[in-house]
Image (tube, coloured by chain):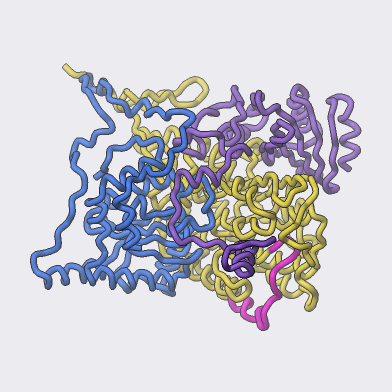
Chain colours: A yellow, B blue, C purple
Amino acid sequence: MAEYPDRSQYPEHLPDGSCDIDLASGKYLKLWQGPNHPGITGNMSVELTVCGDEVVKGKTHVGYLHRGFEKLMERRTFIQCFPIVCRICVPEPDFNEYCYAAAVEELAGLEVPEKADWIRTLILEMGRINSYLMYLGGQAGAFGQGVIGQWTTYARDLMLDRFEELTGARIYHMFILPGGVRDDLPEGFNQRMEETLQEIESTLEDVRNTMFRNAVFKKRAVGLGKVDPALVYEYGITGPVARAAGVAKDVRSDQPYLVYRELDFEPVVAQDSDAYARADVRRRDLLLSVDLIRQVLSRMPRKGPVMATLPNVLHWKIPRGETYVRGECSRGEYGYYLVTDGSGYPRRVNVRGPSYTHAMTLLEKLIVNVNISDVAGLMVSLHTYPPEIER
Amino acid sequence: MKDDIEKRLDKRPSEHPQRPALKEIPVREELLPRTVKTPDGQEIRIDPLQDYYCQAGPTVQTPAYTRIIEDLFNWARAESLWILGFGTGCGAIEMRPLMTPRFDAYRYGIQWRPTPRQANLFVISGYLSVKTLKRAIRSYEQMQNPKYVVGLGSCTINGGMYWDSYNTIKRLDDYLPVDLYITGCMPRPEALLQGFDDLKKLIRAGKAEGANQYAEHFEWYKANQKKVIKDWDMPDYSW
Amino acid sequence: MMQSLYNRLKAPFDLGDFTEQRPDLAFVTVSREQLRPLLLHLRDLEGFTHLVLLTAVDWIEEGVFQLTYLLNDRANARDIGVRLKLPRDDTRMDSIHELWPTAATYQRELREMFGIDFPDSPRVNEDFILEGWNDVPPYRREFDTLEYTRETYPDRAGRETHDPAAYMKQQLYPDGKDNG
């Protein structure tokens, strides 16, 4: 007579709190929330071991977007690298360009003109707004509110129009070069930008009423994925995930770069570090970026060169050295570690993306005891983006 | 590009010397045939790599018996292209604005579906790393006939910017049958809409025969795929 | 600022070269045995609590791998990069995953991409980025990615080169005869 196991038992716990997973017992099921899934940001997968509706273990799998950038950059000269560098991170390509350009300038000893710094800050903040808008659409969509994604994608399109007017392309701008930026602001840009910012602010107001004051969103997001402030240092958490846990970590105020010393702002912090607080931090950070763009446009010098004179770029050799340049992108701390060896090619470029630490170790820690339907919401609330993990 | 593929189909794929592998990749332990004990006590023999439902490969779908009925079917297929929502690469970010009212692909009957069972158009949006190629092949084979493939961006045509990368493929139509290419890096949403319009013209003219080509030259495609996907641990055709 | 830190730590930990790249960024070289005590000292007593990255640079001409551990001190806004040289033919290194749990991920990547072994690191032998890779670890400089691509992924015909030297040669010597 076949004996059926008693499926009413909860998963057994070992003394240290983790689960004793015996796959042959029939209590556990392995599910792949794989690359072809609408609830995944980008193209990565999470291998879940579930017991009923509850996840007991998760394993992140990345590598679906690996192109070997760091190896490709070793085969290209310094000026040939910059078109390829912006394709590492798709929603916010400008941080790659800035960090690479800043690293090359530092090792080559180039002096960037002042107006170029202001334009660079403007572009970085515009990129940050785009990334946050896409995030809001994804976060609401993970909890079933599709209309927020429509509104924010439309607002993002308006900002992409400004990018197109300024740089010539919608997604990959290739505008920030070692030495400055490619071109000055066009005529009437300030006025069109102000119109776009007002449109974005009104969209944000609608989003706030529909998403943040919505009972379903609150019920699902409050308490999801709580990050202990002590984990922030151990796990190398940066960006809005750290700020929502109460640690005011913002590279723009800790180690200011570009013109952030001359702008006045305070890092946006929240205290309860669940998914709702993280979404709120990002929304307030978006409004902060809108304010920063207004400050930049009003304080920017009217005239001035935007590009330093570069040496002959076909024969540009940079002496041996290494450096690390960081910036605060919308997901956290973004950094480039560049090593040169005196030839015309970089010896090693290492890209440090914020999702590297968020998606691998932190997600695997937070995913325990979460419902299957909330896994997507948790992943989007950490704002992980796989291309910067595997480059 | 169509003539190009006719010339290549006669050639054996392993024409250039194969690079000797440093180590063999063994099949994973859970995929080997073995005997297992089920939770209710029975002992059964399983073979995970065998598809129990159907072992046959794809078959060629013949057109309807009269021309006018086939034209009607082609019109219906062209006006309701449902795209598989699998963002395989960079280009996926320019597909999201198509779902909004500004560019609006829905007025052409184009929708995005999460599952391959409900989709008939697979847009390969950009480069494909070898790991994603394996999943893309699986998703493509699970789609039902008639199905079409659109290659988006220059990476599907000749490798694009990653032409010397060890992990991305260079010609998409060695591995999957492509009906249309949309050039750009990356193409604007208007370019995508123009591309879909061209695809519809191809379908109405009866020339979008990618799925039938896959069925006819199945061994050639499989040999190409197995050459780059070195740890082949799937059944040869997945339904 | 970094110079005073170096002067204090030089004797107890037997540090090697010191490069001050910026007022808030410096690189020091340390030997293998002193790495863990130095990292513990920096983390607990000097305030460098954030591990930014752990990466490797392949100096094939000198026959070493350089491992770089980059630490950040947020309170005083300074960074320090700890460099370590490993011989290329004996690439095994102790793991630091007890100090920072995220180091396990960096070590997995180094194992897969460079072939640098970290025997005690958790899950270090699992495939991380590449799947089904049976060749030389790709980030090593002896691996030629162009040659690999030519052998594995065939080209599409009709690809032209826009190399200026080749173009000028064709303009000046259209018959192909190059007299000098």
Please say whether residue A191 is one of the residues in the magenta stretch: yes
In the depicted view, which residue is nearer to us: B238 or B85? B238
Residue at 77% x, 47% y is: A342
In the depicted view, which residue is nearer to us: A361 or C119? C119
Residue at 53% x, 68% y is: A156
Q: How far across and how far down the image is residue C142, in percent? A: 61, 37
Examine the image and state in which quarter residue C88 appears.
top right
Q: Is residue B102 left or right of residue C5?
A: left
Q: How far across and how far down the image is residue A272, in percent? A: 59, 47
Residue at 28% x, 33% y is: B49
Give the number of callouts: 0
Q: Is residue A285 above or below residue C118?
A: below
Q: Is residue B81 left or right of residue B125?
A: left
Q: Is residue A177 visible?
A: yes
Residue at 71% x, 28% y is: C86
Q: Is residue A140 visible?
A: no
Residue furthest out toward the bottom? A188
In the depicted view, which residue is nearer to us: C83 or C163? C163
Q: Is residue B103 above or below residue C67?
A: below
Q: How far across and how far down the image is residue B44, in percent? A: 21, 22
Query: In the rendered structure, which segment of residues is drawn in magenta?
Result: A177-196
